[in-house]
Image (cartoon, rainbow, N blue to C red):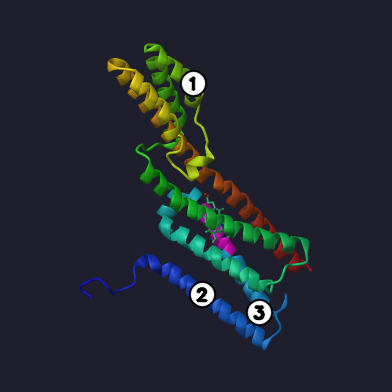
Amino acid sequence: MANGVSGPMPRRWGMPVLFLLAMAAAAAGFVANAYFSEIRAGNVWSLTYGSAAAALLVLAVTYGARRRMMRLASRFRAGGAAGWLGLHIWGGALFLLLMLMHSGFRLPSGVITGWLWALSWWTVLSGIGGRMLQRWIPRMLSSGLTTEVLYERIPDLVEEIRGRAARLAAGSHEAIATLYRDLEPEFAAPRRRWLFFVDITAGRERRGREFRHLRRLLGGEDREQLDRLEGFYRTKLEIDAHYTLQQTLRLWLYLHVPGSLLLVALLAAHLYSVWAY
Ligand code: HEM
């Protein structure tokens, strides 16, 4: 339609719709299973769910390998990063559903199967949590802060600002030098503060009162120097906000990846034990 109200479905919806349909089909299969046959481990229904879940798990972990081999992937035209991430996320969600169907929505009684069950939940839930952080943190940083900072540059930037603030304080009014001595520990190194998760400008107001109070007492050039010191202090707070939130974006992978690799290793042990006995 010319007004753009309806028309072909946007391409980015293609994969979610496909996987939601696959989930609906899997759920319908499970209902049919319950109707026609007993739901128990080892029968053909359960083996089908289990095999499909294992294939999806392999697909999900392949995403990590693809990320590590970007150049090779582009040489063999192995698809774009966004498409792979979509497959990873939606394939991971479908994997969990099939794993639950495979175990008949019951808690497993074996040790390996118990770990497989728990790690599947852990991997998928940590993945969903990480995806939410990946969407939320960049938005929060760009909406509330005036500076853009590369994570790797943070230690150098902090050192530079600390040096500039120290030099300024050394040649200024005694009251400014005293205020700087009080602020010095905050300039010393990048600082993590959990408060940034609720208020990205945290800390600004508390010290702002001290700066305002001093500004009233000072005049002319001293006041200008105080304003410059406040500028340095605000920049340092913004860098700390970047440090806290960008570090979280990196650290969540440590919750997601080791568990997912252990899951794949345990799946191999599970398959071996099923084949061998
Ligand atoms: C709904 C389920 C899942 C979601 C939402 C999810 C989400 C994510 C996200 C957002 C990333 C980081 C992507 C990036 O920044 O490029 C990631 C990485 C990864 N995920 Fe998942 N994931 C899920 C399921 C799984 C499963 C089932 C596995 C198990 C094999 C897995 C293994 C990995 C690995 C190994 C990486 C690291 C990639 C790398 O940096 O090398 N994920 N996942």
Reply yes or no: does residue 60 show up in magenta: yes
Q: Which residue is at a point 48% across and 18% down the rendered structure image?
A: 181
Q: Is residue 69 magenta?
A: no
Between disc 2 and disc 1, the foreground one is 1
Nearer to us in this view, 223 or 168: 223
Write down the residue under mark 1: 182
Whereabouts is ligand 1, in terms of quadrant? bottom right
Q: Are marks 2 and 1 in contact (CB under 8 Å)?
A: no
Magenta span of residues:
57-66
Q: Is residue 76 visible?
A: no
- Which three-letter amino acid code belongs to the residue tagged 1? Asp
Split into 4 quadrants, where in the image is the N terminus? bottom left
**How far across and down, in percent of the image, does residue 9 sit?**
34, 72
Residue that label 2 marks: 22
Q: Residue furthest bottom?
A: 36
Relative to 266, 5 lies left or right: left
- Judged from the image, the secondary structure of the residue bearing numbered disc 1 is helix
Tell me how far mark 2 sits from mark 3, CA to CA.
16 Å
| Residue 75, above or below 273 | above
